[in-house]
Image: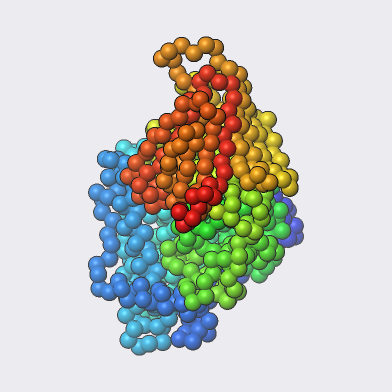
């Protein structure tokens, strides 16, 4: 395949064209000359380097030992096999987890075996045994009818098939992860695998070509490419995996031009994501999606830097430098984070912290590096297979991460992200103690959107008490027409008003207006107009959320145009709050004891307002694992009023009883 011009334009293109000494017309040709040889293109040593992978190698001892223990535990158990009925079930009851869980476990098992094979490569008995285990896992993945996750496949929509059609492979997140896994295995063990099982490397390359390289280059209407200007986390996630695979697997000298072309197309795609990344580095999908969005872009561009001998370096791009700070800016305390959209308030602690640490080092962001290092515990594995095999390899072979001293998360006092209209403020910087409040404006057409314009979260000692529920387990409905039939997506279950019976509507035109943030020594606040988020609103609704540091309280004030005389039975107006923990009702207040070790809070409102508590049992593990058995909604009936102020204070009189 001949080299083709890659005429991409954007902030990444501006930097790369300059660094390559070529404009867009000559960039592809320049790129072919910049790329190092395939065997050196990935920033991890192969198993041939015994100084890294030998018994006394530099790879993280705890991480390797953890993988060896897990691999040994697999024993002779049968390999997990995803069945056709598991894939077809998506179209029966909407379940997508069953198929994905089996595939993920199979991929993790072969990753564990690969580490064992690399570590025991010199052992005449264990080495061949682990290579055989790796071979079986690789072969099963190559034989798998489709690498696409069933929930993403277009087989049913395009061809009426509830099963994937092998002649039309769909390039999605799952296909990207599968080719990346095989690529890293080939890079780590390819020479040893081929010496023992001649032909396995050509099989890997054949599957990569048919399932990834050809669909990527021949079909350019993939929604995640971002040609329509809408880019989201799929973009850097898939492009990064395609780029990695092309760098390593297209290793025939006759494929040099094709290799440069595919790498160039992947860089072009990532440039669309980087160009759309706001100047403040914020992610509208929230913290939980940063790891598979902005972080994926940072990791891919780090590989580009390595694969070009440091010539192409994106670390100076301002938005990329800013997004490195996003995780610690969203940190509430402990393992709690501000969650918006489909994120969890307490996401899994096992994240590729090494990737953040590496990006922070590159950006010179000491606070971001400290936040990453707050998760580095001496004697514990530097990375695990749960984040993907490439991330595992990078984590356990990064000496600065492996040897990093544990640090304290920075916990900034004030955060304001104008691109998403998110404000976070705490009583004192550097500590989660006391009250923290976060508020969002934005619009209801965000990625992974919930109808939540004007919603807020209040945390006590870093533990949320007025909360965003997050999302339940993904099903076919989650991203289908019935998305807003799911209760967690509705504004009625967020901390926003119901106006004359109307909840918020989905879509980008339903947005906040007149948003104003303020951060002063004594108080921080966000005020905004909410009526634009409601299709049925007939007058303005002004909300102000204010953290008063001197009085140690949060005040949520709402003012609106009073409605005409209320007729019995007509829709009511209410101000709502979703509460996590034990809720005890008093006169014109409730006391909430948090779900974690933290000071209880008292939520108070004016006398004479009718209040109801609505308990919502949680039967989905994605929700129950975070919040426990139930959440409680506080409904304040303000139908006959034109304003209300709700205060949230630490309830120190009950603090000792709660601890």
Residue 525 shown left or right of residue 590 in the figure = right
Q: Position of residue 619 (x, y in %)?
A: 32, 44
Residue drawn 54% across the image and 25% down it: 534
Q: Quadrant of the N terminus?
A: bottom right
User: Does residue 534 appear left or right of residue 388 in this picture?
Assistant: right
Asked whether residue 5 is in view, the answer is no
User: Residue 347 versus residue 467: which sits nearer the camera?
Assistant: 467
Q: Nearer the viewer, residue 282 or 244?
A: 282
The image shows a total of numbered marks equal to 0
Relative vertical location of residue 530 with respect to residue 354 in this rendering, above or below: above
Judge by depth and name the residue closer to the eye, 275 or 477: 477
Quadrant in the picture for residue 17 = bottom right
> Horizontally, is 314 left or right of 493 in the view?
right
Q: Is residue 508 above or below residue 350?
A: above
Which residue is located at x 24 percent, y 67 percent? 78
Residue 529 visible (yes or no): yes
Residue 484: image quadrant is top left
Q: Position of residue 481 (x, y in %)?
A: 40, 32
Q: Residue at x 53, y 28 (%)?
A: 607
Q: Residue at x 55, y 56 (%)?
A: 333
User: Is residue 254 shown above or below 586?
Assistant: below
Q: Report x, y in % for residue 113.
A: 37, 73
Viewer-closest of 513 and 629: 629
Q: What colouring style does the render use?
A: rainbow
């Amino acid at each position: 395949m001949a080299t083709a011009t890659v005429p991409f334009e954007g902030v990444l293109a501006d930097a790369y064209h300059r660094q390559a000494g070529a404009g867009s017309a000559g960039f592809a040709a320049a790129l072919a000359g910049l790329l190092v040889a395939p065997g050196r293109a990935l920033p991890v040593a192969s198993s041939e380097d015994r100084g890294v992978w030998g018994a006394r190698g530099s790879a993280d001892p705890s991480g390797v030992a953890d993988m060896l223990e897990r691999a040994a535990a697999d024993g002779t158990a049968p390999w997990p096999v995803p069945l056709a009925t598991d894939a077809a079930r998506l179209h029966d009851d909407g379940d997508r987890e069953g198929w994905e869980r089996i595939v993920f476990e199979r991929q993790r098992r072969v990753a564990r075996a690969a580490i064992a094979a690399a570590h025991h490569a010199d052992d005449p008995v264990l080495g061949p045994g682990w290579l055989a285990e790796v071979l079986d896992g690789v072969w099963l993945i190559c034989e798998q009818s489709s690498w696409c996750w069933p929930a993403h496949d277009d087989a049913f929509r395009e061809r009426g098939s509830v099963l994937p059609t092998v002649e039309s492979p769909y390039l999605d997140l799952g296909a990207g992860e599968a080719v990346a896994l095989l690529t890293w295995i080939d890079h780590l063990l390819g020479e040893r695998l081929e010496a023992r099982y001649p032909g396995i490397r050509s099989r890997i390359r054949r599957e990569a070509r048919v399932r990834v390289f050809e669909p990527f280059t021949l079909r350019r209407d993939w929604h995640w490419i971002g040609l329509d200007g809408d880019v989201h986390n799929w973009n850097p996630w898939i492009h990064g995996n395609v780029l990695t695979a092309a760098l390593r697997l297209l290793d025939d000298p006759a494929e040099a031009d094709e290799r440069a072309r595919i790498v160039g197309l992947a860089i072009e795609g990532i440039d669309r994501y980087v160009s759309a990344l706001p100047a403040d580095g914020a992610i509208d999908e929230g913290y939980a999606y940063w790891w598979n969005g902005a972080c994926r872009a940072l990791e891919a561009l780090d590989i580009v830097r390595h694969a070009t001998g440091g010539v192409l370096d994106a670390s100076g791009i301002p938005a990329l430098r800013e997004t490195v700070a996003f995780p610690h800016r969203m940190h509430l305390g402990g393992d709690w984070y501000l969650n918006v959209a489909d994120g969890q308030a307490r996401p899994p602690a096992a994240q590729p912290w090494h990737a953040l640490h590496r990006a922070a080092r590159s950006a010179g962001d000491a606070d971001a590096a400290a936040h990453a290092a707050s998760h580095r515990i001496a004697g514990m594995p530097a990375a695990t297979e749960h984040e993907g095999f490439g991330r595992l390899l990078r984590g356990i072979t990064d000496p600065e991460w492996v040897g990093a001293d544990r640090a304290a998360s920075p916990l900034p006092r004030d955060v304001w992200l104008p691109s998403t209209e998110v404000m976070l403020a705490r009583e004192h910087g550097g500590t989660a103690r006391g009250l923290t409040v976060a508020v969002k404006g934005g619009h209801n057409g965000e990625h992974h959107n919930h109808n939540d314009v004007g919603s807020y979260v209040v945390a006590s000692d870093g533990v949320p008490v007025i909360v965003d529920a997050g999302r339940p387990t993904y099903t076919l409905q989650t991203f289908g027409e019935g998305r807003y039939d799911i209760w967690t997506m509705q504004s009625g279950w967020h901390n926003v008003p119901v106006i004359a019976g109307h909840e918020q509507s989905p879509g980008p035109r339903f947005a906040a207006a007149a948003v104003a943030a303020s951060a002063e020594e004594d108080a921080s606040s966000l005020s905004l107009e909410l009526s634009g988020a409601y299709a049925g609103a007939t007058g303005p609704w002004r909300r102000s959320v204010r953290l008063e540091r001197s009085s140690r309280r949060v005040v949520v004030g709402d003012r609106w145009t009073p409605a005409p005389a209320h007729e019995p039975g007509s829709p009511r107006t209410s101000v709502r709050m979703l509460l996590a923990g034990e809720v005890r009702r008093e006169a014109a207040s409730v006391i909430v004891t948090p779900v974690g070790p933290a000071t209880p809070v008292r939520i108070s409102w004016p006398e004479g307002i009718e209040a109801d508590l609505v308990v919502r049992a949680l039967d989905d593990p994605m929700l129950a694992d975070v919040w426990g058995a139930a959440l409680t909604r506080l409904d304040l009936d303000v139908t006959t009023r034109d304003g209300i102020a709700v205060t949230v204070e630490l309830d120190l009189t009950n603090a000792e009883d709660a601890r």
